[in-house]
Image (spheres, rainbow, N blue to C red):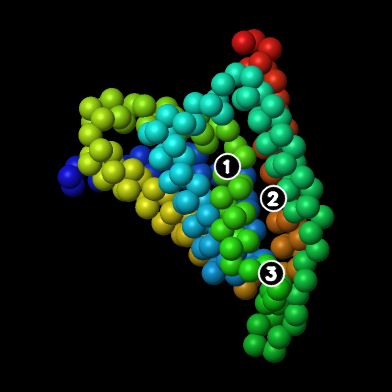
């Protein structure tokens, strides 16, 4: 099963490299900078749980209900609006800092309980129907590749999902590591950039589903 796991890891690396810079990425980095490494890890765990549920639902075939053309349009529009709201909140977020003798500008922001971060990570991923479509395509292709073998599919997706989780934690740690070099102005600028990014994803999502609906 070693080869199967390696194939899963390669898919995870591909996903993290080429598809890992969506709305969840902005939320992950911003959480690491503002709230700390621990909360960012919890956010990454929420994203991991979402991916796991997506794969499980794809394998069960239940997710096809959401990708029906009539449901896809309204779900895509509502998801885009939600992402835009997240973006507006992020864009207008104020940076709260405390000056400390041992560190020029540490960030000390009180945040919600641990399950809120996990729920946010789960939600940030689940509102993006492109993630669903991606997993449907992967699951269908890989299921055919392994002839529907439950054991091989388990090993493959275990390698994929764990790799994606490790990548997200790595991104969070990188953001946390450079936090000490950031001042209030730079962090505020990052909020603006992250907010614009989320709003942009929301607009793109709405435009994409409307375009698909019109040409469909």
Disc on the earlier residue, 2 or 3: 3
Q: Write the residue at 73% across / 62% down.
A: 186
Q: Residue at x 30, y 29 (%)?
A: 143
Residue 81 image position (x, y, % from top left): 75, 37
From the viewer's perspective, tell me whether residue 89 is left or right of residue 157.
Answer: right
Residue under label 3, please give it: 111
Query: In the picture provided, is 54 more to the left or to the right than 4?
Result: right
Q: Position of residue 118 (x, y in %)?
A: 56, 58
Q: CA distance from mark 1 to mark 3?
A: 22 Å
Mark 1 or 2, nearer chain start: 1
**SS class of the residue under badge 3?**
loop
Q: Looking at the image, which residue sits at the far bottom?
A: 101
Q: Nearer the viewer, residue 3 or 47?
A: 47
Q: Position of residue 7 (x, y in %)?
A: 27, 40
Mark linked to residue 126 = 1
Q: Nearer the viewer, residue 203 or 155?
A: 155
> Dividing the picture into quarters, in which one does residue 94 lie?
bottom right
């Amino acid at each position: 099963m070693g080869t199967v796991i390696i194939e899963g890891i390669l898919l995870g690396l591909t996903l993290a490299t080429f598809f890992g810079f969506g709305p969840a990425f902005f939320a992950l980095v911003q959480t690491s900078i503002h709230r700390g490494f621990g909360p960012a890890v919890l956010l990454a765990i929420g994203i991991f749980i979402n991916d796991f549920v997506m794969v499980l639902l794809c394998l069960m075939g239940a997710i096809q209900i959401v990708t029906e053309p009539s449901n896809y349009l309204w779900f895509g529009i509502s998801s885009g609006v939600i992402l835009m709201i997240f973006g507006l909140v992020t864009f207008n977020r104020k940076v709260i800092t405390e000056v400390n003798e041992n560190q020029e500008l540490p960030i000390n922001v009180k945040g919600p309980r641990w399950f809120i971060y996990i729920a946010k990570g789960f939600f940030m991923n689940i509102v993006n129907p492109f993630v669903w479509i991606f997993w449907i395509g992967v699951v269908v292709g890989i299921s055919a590749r392994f002839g529907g073998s439950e054991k091989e599919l388990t090993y493959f997706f275990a390698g994929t999902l764990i790799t994606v989780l490790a990548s997200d934690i790595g991104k969070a740690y990188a953001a946390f590591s450079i936090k000490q070099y950031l001042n209030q102005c730079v962090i505020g600028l990052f909020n603006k950039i992250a907010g614009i990014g989320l709003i942009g994803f929301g607009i793109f999502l709405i435009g994409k589903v409307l375009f698909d609906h019109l040409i469909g």
